[in-house]
Amino acid sequence: MKKTNKSFFLQATLAFTLLCSFPLTAQDASQKLVHQTEAKDAPVVYFTRDVSAAGLMKVYNALNQKKQGKVGIKVSFGGPGEDVLKPALLTDLIKETDGTMLDSCGLSGNRWTAEMNLSHARKHGFDKVGRMQMLDEKSDIDMPVRKGYLLKYARTGSHFDEYDTIVSVFKFRMHFLPALDGAIKNVTLCLGSRSGKCLIHSGGSDPNHYHDTKPDVLEKSFADALRAVLDYKKNWAFINVIDSYEPEDSCKGTKNTGNIGIIASADPVALDQCSVDFVADTAETAEIRAQWEEAHQVKMLEYAENLGCGKRNYQLVEIK
């Protein structure tokens, strides 16, 4: 009898340890995320808990993206000391696609030039995993906005024209800057040249200066810029890495949610909405969740959906 009790205790301890090795999300509780649906016409978001180069390839391969011509991998090289995407996660993707990592210059003094940005990229280790290019090191190109809210065009660097297939890979951070830090930001504001960033921040009124604009103006500008890039380049894949991150904002009740996983979709709106759901579902109350979403301008997803950029409701498919 004593042996049986000891065996049971050991098994229970092992089960508890295994359970605690994963973050407790709505998925673990057999509950749907807020915007998750079973509707067959909803876009699919692929999800893996495996936060590694191999895990990233699991969800990317599930998309069956047809790689044509030259492949660009849009990342953010980040600034000094910034908690950015781990370059090692890109190793298998770069090998598979022969892709070049792409970014654009920033408005801050330490990210003003192409060389400044590449210097930060090297410090973060991106040069160790593949080729890098700053899109706007020479000149800019304009991408028309079709029936947008505010912008007439979005603007990025001329090297963007050299790429036929684009894969966006971004470290999702909800509790970072005011604007939602996900795939849409990566392919709009982060893709934009310095002038392109000014256009988004000013609601299209000023291509030369930064403006601290109202949230609804910025949300609509993000949606407009997304409409422009999706029309300008047709072959996209979007990947968000939702890994360990210490919140850097003043939102109530935030915490490091640990390594949730990596998600991928052909729909950037669905991808960012799923990312928000994974993180925001950890809020203690619906009121706190609503505060988080307002603080980080999540309404941009609704504006983007209204422009036909994607859908907020999604099917979630976990890949082991």
Image (cartoon, rainbow, N blue to C red):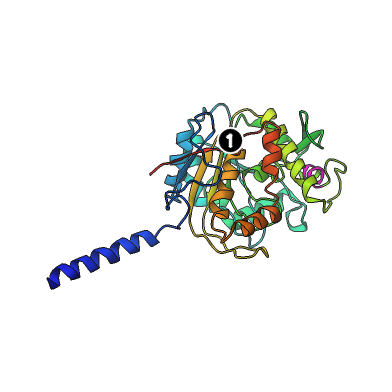
Q: Is residue 175 visible?
A: no
Q: In the rendered structure, which segment of residues is drawn in magenta?
A: 196-201
192 lies above or below 80: above
The residue that appears at 61% across and 62% down in the rendered structure is 247
Residue 177: give x, y in percent of width and height. Answer: 69, 56
Q: Nearer the viewer, residue 77 or 310?
A: 310
Residue 303: give x, y in percent of width and height. Answer: 71, 39
Residue 37: give x, y in percent of width and height. Answer: 51, 38
Q: Nearer the viewer, residue 95 or 27?
A: 27
Give the residue type at disc 1.
Answer: Asp
Q: Which residue is mark 1?
A: 267
10 Å crowding of disc 1: few (<14), some (14-19), many (20+): many
Within the image, what quadrant is residue 226 found in?
top right
Q: Is residue 15 left or right of residue 65?
A: left
| The stretch drawn in magenta includes residue 147 | no
Helix, strand or loop for the magenta stretch, by majority: helix
Q: Is residue 139 left or right of residue 274?
A: right
32 lies above or below 22: above
The residue that appears at 54% across and 58% down in the rendered structure is 282
Q: Is residue 114 visible?
A: yes
Q: Nearer the viewer, residue 274 or 82?
A: 274
The residue that appears at 34% across and 64% down in the rendered structure is 17
